[in-house]
Image (tube, helix red, strand yellow):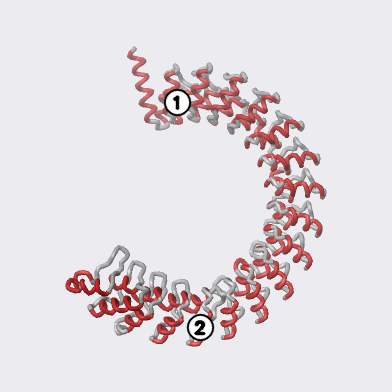
Amino acid sequence: MGTVDDVTRLFPKIREWIHDRDEDGHTALHHAAKNEQKNEGEKIVTLLLEKGAYVNVADRWQRTVFHYATLAGNVHVLRAIILHRKYLHVDAVDIEGNTALHYASGIGNEDIVDILVDIGADINADDESGCTALHEASKNCHKEVVKMLLNKGALFDDGDKSGPSENGHEEVVKALLERGADTNAKDKFGCTALYFASREGHEGVVKILLAQGAQVNARGKLGSTALYEASENGHKGVVEMLLDKEAHVEAIEQFGRTALYVASEKGYIEVVDMLLDRKAHVDARDDIGCTALHVASANGREKVVKRLLDGGADINARDENNDTALHFASRKGHGGVVEILLDRKAHVDARGKFGCTALHGASRGGHEKAVKCLISKKADINAKDGYNNTALHFSSRKGRGGVVEILLDEGAHVDTRGKFRRTALHEASSHGRIGVVEQLLENRAEIEARDGFGRTALHAASAHGRKGVVEQLLKKRADIHATDEKQRTALYFSSLKGHGGVVRILLDKGAHVDARDRFGFTALHAVSANGHDRVVTILLDRGAKIETKNFYGHTALQLARRYGQEHIVNELSRREAKSIGK
């Protein structure tokens, strides 16, 4: 907005622009109301209003000039607008339900708050979230505005929605309590001021609230208490105050977790010390059977693990999946915790979920330090889970080369059969772990080992499109013509799955393009039924016979028609016609 002189020069054409809006819905009056220069702003606003500017027009956020004058903190502009209050909506709300009084209270402008209340602004008007002007002043620690609003009749009766306790505003908390605010009022989630102050670690506010009779064991969101919240966030001073007021140390929240549980999980050793000194149950379990030791171990909290064990924690306690603390620490790769637990005689080969040992979990995750530590404590290197998989199977599947090397060096059986009688080589091959495949072969893994379906590592790699592994296995003289129990070759599987790159490699290395399975199906039959156009072209270009019938009398063309593979039908028909034409 320009100066008064600028506006005056535009008067001859004022009817053409006075109500014009910019892209945000602002008129000239909106811009004038934002002017923080008291004299210029007041004069321009007065001129515009005298020329008929609409005082209640709202922008795209539903803010009126009254909102903007309040935000600018210009009392003179505000007074100029108020002179037109015959038409003024004092309690006009923006898109979030805020009135000008909400704004003035939030920024702590005592003069404007006083003016607005005096001209009849609704002192207890709620915004969309249910907050009043008093809440805004409290939230932003404007103590004098809080007192002013209370003196003028503002109501306060709904917990800590305003946030003075949550934000540590001691003077505001005192002012509200002096005016009769309910110390134990709850918000819509059941949370009290003590809950919020404890969660945020505001010792001064906690002290004030406790002195005023705050209920120390009141339940808040998800059933947690102030002690739980303070413990979870490591506020040792608050924890001590609450314990001195006989906070229930065994109180659990919705999921069965105690203050000791969450303090252990987060690694707050001093809080853990306090809680154990107050006889917290060291082996209390949550809803899935986990203890404080489980979660401390899972998060690598070495000091806490030691303290819990010193406090009598059951080192071999199991959760609902049968997992112990050692399982958790090993799975997450916390070598230091693994070492502590093993030194304290944790069962090294305890069976957890699916029959897994700690070594299985550490190997799957590639945690070399934990693996070495477990092996040094005589973990069974060839232990099998409920599906017959060993640590070598898991590490091979995940491509954990370092762990594979450790296991093989320590005597892991390279060809042990796991789930579906697969070997580690099958696992590494099907997942494309080229480096691990090399390691296993160097350690004399049986390249032609058959799984429960009669398939070799080459079958597995081909079926999953692992070009690098296929080339690697063929270099090591894997049998390209090997068949499974249904007499299917690697070419059949790579074609069936549409892995054109592998199909080319196998054909280049001499795979029989028209090899049949037990039911007379060729690779062309398989791919035609499954719709892999590109592979059909490759097979045909390499001499696959279109007219070959399976043992049910079907050609590839007939199968393509049956399964609605239109593009393949067209290609096979074209090739067939071309062949007949010759």
- Where is residue 413 drawn, in percent x and y? 74, 30
Q: Which mark is residue 132?
A: none
**Is residue 419 shown to the viewer in this render?**
no
Of callouts 2 and 1, the N-terminal one: 2
- Residue 198: image quadrant is bottom right
Q: Residue at x 78, y 51 (%)?
A: 316
- Where is residue 190 drawn, in percent x and y? 58, 72
Please say if 133 is above or below 96: below
In this view, the residue in front, 95 or 328, is 95
Mark 2 is on which residue type?
Leu
Please say if 550 is above or below 81: above
Q: Residue at x 36, y 75 (%)?
A: 37
Mark 1 is on which residue type?
Val
Q: Which residue is mark 1?
A: 535
| Quadrant position of the C terminus in the picture | top left
Q: Which residue is mark 2?
A: 155
**Circle 2: is it few (<14), some (14-19), or many (20+) Cα within 10 Å?**
some
| Label 1 secondary element | helix
